[in-house]
Image (cartoon, coloured by chain):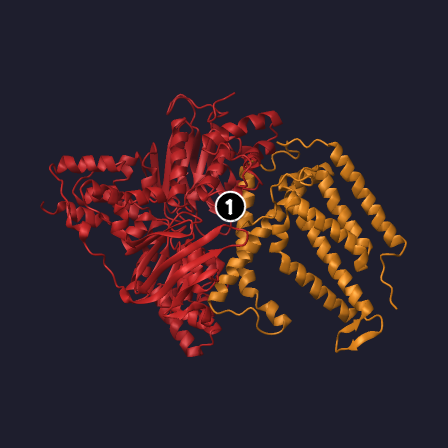
Chain colours: A orange, B red
């Protein structure tokens, strides 16, 4: 099973200039940020779904399907505890179940899911080298940009390692699902320590290997790949700006808000 | 354009005294920060242009520290107290940054996962050239020749994570070659590889040597360093022996004392009273025939029964038509059938990705079959509670650091029994028992993270043994251990087997299979290709060839005389018997 998210396809999203893709990531975050109502978030969700289909990123979304479901459900429930607006539909302990809290909570869950989906889509269609080049083009120092993108490479490795540690401990009879929420968090200590120690060792080995390959010799290394700006990049850039303006307009006109009645 | 394996620091003719050494360590002493003794003491080493020097020694002897001095990782990256001089091409490296040395000294590390950073093979090779600020056209011109040199031409667009271990390590070498350094250092480059990967990398090293590159190769299997110009043995930070392979590799006692696996061919020769060095099976055969003319017979070892503790009448594991696939992946197991009897010692072998670990994980319940079933002592594994499964089969992961977390050795061992709710005195009794079995009773109060790799591996075994499984599965139990630690580990496994525990060992190491296992299961692409006695397996040339699994050299030599021997002693005894 592949560890990393990048899927090598030739879709138009894959072929966009790295800077446009980094900008697209920013615009999607911007667009999601301004609206709260699930109906206002739905068009963005449809755009993401269409891009998932076009780019062939579905296997990554399938792998993370439980994470998406978990995010939407727990966020919806959590906001029903804190967002106590509107007349309750049923009286429940702790949870305030009203139309407004349900819509608000679900909207928040959908927001987080769309942010995650945008990130997964970005990583499914962007090589780390492109990510670094995109950040450099936007003025981020090379070393900072490289470190950020390297982190994206490392996270899946640590998740993979955590999976192995969970298996090793469960074979020794360890039950991760005992007790209440706090106890459950505490019970992950036998996983956190080996993963953390392994991460430290790996990070040290990687830093050593990087320096041994000349990393740090030049503040502005050359790039093996040339990334010219093409007409499609300009088109995509314009479309993204339009999307950002539309989402802000929805917020500004009050259509994206949730009314409490 | 330069030839694919050219260097930007062109060497003089091999061994030319007129030219400065390609690399030299002059009186180097180094102590790591916080270290209580020097990792290197007064080391003097010279690598002449075009030469290959092999460095051998036990874990912790100072081999890697020595290698890291050559590109300033020591003391530039791993700090400490350093004295002496390191010269590359005659120039002292005083004060140079590690990255500034990269164009002169290329380094390939043991952990291939940690030295690949890019999304495709071409980017990986380009990385170091980009870092030193090379022009785009020059980078593009060098990628092809570098990949061609390591046999990866045509792999430009492949994701490095999709390559086999051997291919990854060859890619790491290509990434170093592209900078055309004057010296290349390879620090145990094949430790984590299967036999095919090892063979690929050592064949490449021989090719680099033929092209006149100056190489330093760190290794603890002496057999692999026989083609070097010179070999050195490091012990406790000092070079204690140095010379041509023919001189050093006949000093078998010294090699063993230093945690190095001596060439088994030389051991056989010495047992036969021939004090000589054999660089190959052909040479060993020639030396034996010269001393013992007319030696040619079929030997009864061929038909000798395998030593076994197994009770075939009582299979404790039955795997029936097992099939499995990971999501979006090809079948990882396809219709696997086999049995494990109580008390057996079985080796599962096969290339990376052949399904060995997937099969083992099914037996212990970490994976659920897509089709077929597994019976443990006659009961369907999926119906067993975790404690029942743990009592039937224990699994020791390849990397002990994937499970160690406790503050003391004793707590680490007690973790499993406590989880299963055993009473305190029973937990204590089991800890005492297994810590004695793995020879760690004295270390019970120590922090497990401060143990050596070999000790941590034995601790991992102990923590699984504390659950008293009837079957113990060990995934690559000797990876990363030096010869002495490997022997100690396998002695422990042998003792457990004699005490009645069935052993399944997943391994890539031919001599471990030959000397310890009694039955071999060979897997390829999720299927069992061979299941039978070890000796018979090593007689099946077509199987060995197609599975890229080499018979140990002792076995290869024995077969020249009609004997399928598995151990040096066995072969020597057979050859000494009157015809």
Give the farthest residue toward the left. B578
Q: Nearer the viewer, residue B269 or B200?
A: B200
Q: Is B2 rendered above or below residue B78?
A: above
Q: Is B351 rendered above or below residue B145?
A: below
Residue A141 placement: quadrant: top right
Q: Residue at x 72, y 43 (%)?
A: A22
Q: Which residue is mark 1?
A: B113
Quadrant (top left/top right/bottom left/bottom right) for the C terminus of chain A: bottom right
Mark 1, residues whose alpha carbon is within 10 Å: few (<14), some, or many (≥20)?
some
Q: Position of residue B510 (x, y in %)?
A: 32, 48
Indicate left or right for B96 with B426 as reference.
right
Q: Position of residue A31 (x, y in %)?
A: 79, 50
Q: Is residue B406 visible?
A: no
Q: Residue at x 25, y 44 (%)?
A: B554
Q: Residue at x 51, y 40 (%)?
A: B73
Q: Position of residue B523 (x, y in %)?
A: 38, 51
């Amino acid at each position: 099973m592949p560890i990393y998210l990048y899927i090598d396809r030739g879709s138009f999203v894959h072929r966009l200039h790295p800077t446009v893709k980094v900008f697209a990531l920013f615009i999607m975050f911007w667009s999601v940020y301004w609206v709260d109502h699930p109906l206002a978030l739905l068009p963005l969700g449809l755009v993401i779904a269409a891009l998932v289909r076009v780019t062939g990123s579905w296997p990554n979304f399938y792998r993370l399907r439980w994470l998406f479901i978990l995010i939407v459900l727990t966020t919806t429930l959590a906001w029903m505890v804190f967002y106590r607006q509107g007349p309750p539909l049923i009286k429940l302990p702790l949870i305030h179940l009203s139309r407004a809290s349900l819509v608000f909570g679900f909207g928040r869950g959908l927001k987080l899911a769309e942010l995650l989906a945008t990130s997964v889509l970005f990583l499914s269609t962007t090589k780390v080298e492109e990510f670094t080049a995109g950040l450099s083009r936007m003025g981020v120092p090379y070393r900072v940009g490289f470190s950020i993108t390297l982190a994206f490479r490392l996270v899946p490795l640590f998740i993979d390692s955590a999976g192995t540690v969970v298996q090793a401990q469960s074979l020794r009879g360890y039950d991760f699902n005992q007790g209440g929420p706090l106890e459950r968090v505490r019970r992950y200590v036998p996983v956190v320590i080996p993963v953390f120690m392994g991460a430290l060792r790996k990070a040290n080995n990687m830093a050593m290997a990087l320096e041994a390959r000349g990393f740090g010799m030049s503040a502005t290394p050359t790039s093996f790949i040339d990334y010219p700006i093409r007409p499609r990049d300009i088109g995509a850039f314009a479309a993204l700006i339009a999307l950002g303006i539309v989402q802000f307009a929805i917020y500004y006109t009050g259509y994206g808000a949730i009314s409490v009645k | 354009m330069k030839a694919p394996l050219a260097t930007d620091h062109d060497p003089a003719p091999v061994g030319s005294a007129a030219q400065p050494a390609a690399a030299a360590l002059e009186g180097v002493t180094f102590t790591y920060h916080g270290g209580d003794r020097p990792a290197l003491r007064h080391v003097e080493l010279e690598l002449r242009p075009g030469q290959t020097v092999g460095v051998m020694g036990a874990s912790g002897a100072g081999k890697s520290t020595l290698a890291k001095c050559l590109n300033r990782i020591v003391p530039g990256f791993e700090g400490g107290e350093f004295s002496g001089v390191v010269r590359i091409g005659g120039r002292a490296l005083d004060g140079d940054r590690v990255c500034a040395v990269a164009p002169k000294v290329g380094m390939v590390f043991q952990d291939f996962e940690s030295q690949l950073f890019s999304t495709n093979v071409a980017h990986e090779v380009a990385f170091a050239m980009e870092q030193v600020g090379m022009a785009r056209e020059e980078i593009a011109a060098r990628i092809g020749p570098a990949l061609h040199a390591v046999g990866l031409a045509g792999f430009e667009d492949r994701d490095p994570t999709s390559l086999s271990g051997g291919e990854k390590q060859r890619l790491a070498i290509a990434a170093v070659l592209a900078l055309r350094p004057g010296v290349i250092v390879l620090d145990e480059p094949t430790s984590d590889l299967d036999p095919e990967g090892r063979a690929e990398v050592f064949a490449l090293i021989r090719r680099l040597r033929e092209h006149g590159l100056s190489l330093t190769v760190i290794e603890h299997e002496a057999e692999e360093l026989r083609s070097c110009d010179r070999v050195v043995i490091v012990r406790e930070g000092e070079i204690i022996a140095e010379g041509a392979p023919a001189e050093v590799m006949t000093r078998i006692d010294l090699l063993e004392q230093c945690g190095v696996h001596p060439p088994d061919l030389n051991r056989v020769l010495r047992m036969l009273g021939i004090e000589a060095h054999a660089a190959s099976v052909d040479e060993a055969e020639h030396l034996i025939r010269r001393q013992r003319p007319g030696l040619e017979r079929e030997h009864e070892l061929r038909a000798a029964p395998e030593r076994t503790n197994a009770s075939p009448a009582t299979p404790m594991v039955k795997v029936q038509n097992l099939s499995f696939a990971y999501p979006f992946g090809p079948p990882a197991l396809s219709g696997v059938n086999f049995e494990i009897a109580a008390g057996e010692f079985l080796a599962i072998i096969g290339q990376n990705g052949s399904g060995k670990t997937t099969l083992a994980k099914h037996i212990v319940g970490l994976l659920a079959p897509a089709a077929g079933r597994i019976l443990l002592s006659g009961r369907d594994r999926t119906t067993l509670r975790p404690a029942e499964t743990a009592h039937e089969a224990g699994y020791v992961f390849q990397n002990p650091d994937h499970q160690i977390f406790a503050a003391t050795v004793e707590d680490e061992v007690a973790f499993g029994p406590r989880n299963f709710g055993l009473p305190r005195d029973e937990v204590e009794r089991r800890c005492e028992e297994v810590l004695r079995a793995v020879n760690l009773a004295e270390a019970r109060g120590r922090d497990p993270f401060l143990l050596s790799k070999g000790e941590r591996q034995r601790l991992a075994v102990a923590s699984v043994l504390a659950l008293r499984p009837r079957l113990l599965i060990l995934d690559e139990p000797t990876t990363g251990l030096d010869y002495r630690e490997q022997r100690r580990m396998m002695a422990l496994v042998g003792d457990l087997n004699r005490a009645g525990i069935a052993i399944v060992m997943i391994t890539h190491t031919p001599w471990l299979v030959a000397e310890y296992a009694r039955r071999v299961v060979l897997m390829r692409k999720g299927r069992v290709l061979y299941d039978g006695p070890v000796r018979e397996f090593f007689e099946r040339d077509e199987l060995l060839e197609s599975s890229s699994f080499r018979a140990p050299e002792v076995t290869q030599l024995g077969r020249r005389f009609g004997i399928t021997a598995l151990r040096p002693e066995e072969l020597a005894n057979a050859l000494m018997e009157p015809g």
